[in-house]
Image: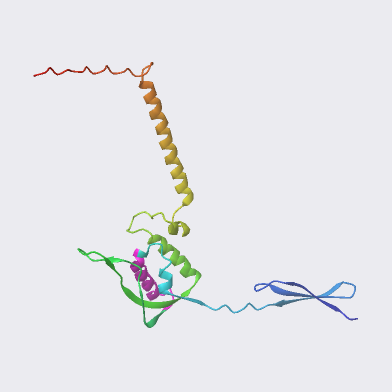
Amino acid sequence: MPFGFELQHIIRQHATLMVHYRSQHGKRIHHLELGVRQPYSKSMYKRLSEQVQSLVNPQRSDTFIKRFREAVRTGQIKAINLPSERFTMPKQYTRRGKTGTYQKDTKEMLFEVTPEFEAWFEEQNKDLAVSRQGGQVKVTEETLAAGLVDFGALARETQAKMQASYEKGQLLGKSRGAKSKPGGAKSKPAARSRTRKAGA
């Protein structure tokens, strides 16, 4: 008896191919499950100069590069040097006693982007967001977008400050009203005009 073929379900990438054979009467007589091989995923590589642009505080880019190279040395990050290639760090340097700023170049590197690196970079980016050790993260659109500051907490703090200022103004207005006497303020007596005698 001839059989009909029906492809019942395909789930792309991580699924299995379910093939069902059914008889002419629709009764399933055989079930075959075939594994679908996942497509080969190529590794992602990124330049150090490109990653530095993602720092929320470019003035700490020199410290980040030092930490990056240390992570490469210890095997935490897989990276290679790109011979004869250099890039300019975004940090602005100043000379003591002189006006203006200058920048420095450093060696270019190519590294492998992994979930472990993403977690490492997120931690470093948060730590370097402040200009000095122990300081507070400056509130900017970049730090908000990076999740380095809590917008909800800042909004509640702003509301509380505005409410406190409003209540203080209300109390001040009431205290001034209580001090004023009924009938309004007394008018000051008109100053006597002095006439200067002729010849004086």
Q: Is residue 94 above or below residue 45?
A: above
Quadrant in the picture for residue 172: top left
Q: Nearer the viewer, residue 170 or 82?
A: 170
User: In the rendered structure, does residue 6 fall within the stretch colored magenta?
Assistant: no
Residue 45 x %, y %? 48, 77
The region drawn magenta spans 59-79
Q: Is residue 186 left or right of residue 193?
A: right
Q: Nearer the viewer, residue 184 or 42?
A: 184
Q: Is residue 108 above or below residue 144?
A: below
How are the residues colored?
rainbow
Q: Residue at x 38, y 21 (%)?
A: 178
Give the quadrant of the C terminus. top left
User: In the rendered structure, does residue 71 fall within the stretch colored magenta?
Assistant: yes
Q: Residue at x 46, y 48 (%)?
A: 153
Q: Residue at x 37, y 65 (%)?
A: 58
Q: What predominant SS class does the magenta segment belong to?
A: helix
Residue 60 seen in this snapshot: yes
Q: Is residue 127 above or below residue 109?
A: above
Q: Is residue 149 left or right of residue 27?
A: left
Residue 76 seen in this snapshot: no
- In the rendered image, the residue lying farthest to the front is 198
Q: Nearer the viewer, residue 194 or 156?
A: 194
Residue 164 x %, y %? 42, 37
Quadrant in the picture for residue 33: bottom right
Residue 86 x %, y %? 36, 78
Q: Is residue 98 above or below residue 39?
A: above
